[in-house]
Amino acid sequence: MASHELKTPLTSLNALLQVASLKLKNSEDPFLAGAMEKSNIQVKRMTAMINGFLNISRLESGKIYIEKQNFDMEALIKDMISEASLTASTHLMHFVQCPPIPVNADRDKIGSVISNLINNAVKYSPKGKNIEIACKTKDNQLVVSIKDEGMGIKRDDLTKIFDRYYRVQTNNTQHIAGFGIGLYLSAEIIHRHGGEIWAESESGVGSIFYFSLPLETIWAV
């Protein structure tokens, strides 16, 4: 209930910021335009956080639904990269194009998984590093991967990172905001599609997050 109520003032704030941004777009004071842009970014982060808690509530009450439709995975990944680039201009994103694969799944929810994995790659990587997004078919599965050149994850943490509210605790992560719900929700969405999600990582080198969808789901018509 609290999360739902928070969305109302946040929606109004977002609308006001958009109007203010348009009015200040050609302002002679560069600080004002920059402040509006940063404010919009923070509102988007808060919105994503609230939506995350709402989705957990729906998940626990059995009210989160998978609404499948046919869509192009390559187009979805490009959309998510474009969206992430608006708030992550400090990183270099590379997309290894997908083969032409029509997907039958919940486009919005798979999009949120991709977005979350890209944002995590940005969050846990130093500025200027590369993030590579790719997809391929293997063993009757569509596999999407997001690779970063960040701090990496210790072996003991790899088995727990998809647990609800679990966050890796190191000296490097103390300043990084989060509640440990993004990967948990992503895992639940993928599992409800009959797929799998996992990660490979090496401390100080980087991580690769993967998720798969079974081909029998993908090729459904």
Image (tube, grey):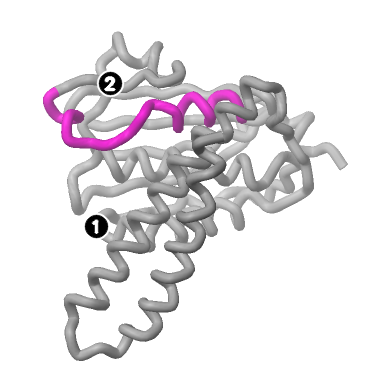
Image coordinates for residue 39, horizontal then vertical, percent: 31, 62
Which is more toward the observer, 175 or 132?
175
On the rendered structure, is 49 left or right of 149?
Answer: right
In the rendered image, the vertical position of residue 11 relative to residue 120, given as above or below: below
> Magenta part of the protein: which range?
171-189
On the rendered structure, is 39 left or right of 118?
Answer: left
Q: Which residue is mark 1?
A: 90
Circle 2: element type = loop
Q: Which residue is mark 2?
A: 168
Tell me which corner region of the image, top left, top right, bottom left or bottom right, holds residue 183: top left
Instruction: Kindly give the residue lying farthest to the right in the view shown.
Output: 221
Image coordinates for residue 22, horizontal then vertical, percent: 40, 82
Residue shown at 56% from the left, 41% from the top: 4
Tell me which corner region of the image, top left, top right, bottom left or bottom right, holds residue 106: top right
In the rendered image, the vertical position of residue 132 relative to residue 41, given as above or below: above
Which of labels 1 and 2 is toward the front?
Answer: 2
Q: Is residue 179 magenta?
A: yes
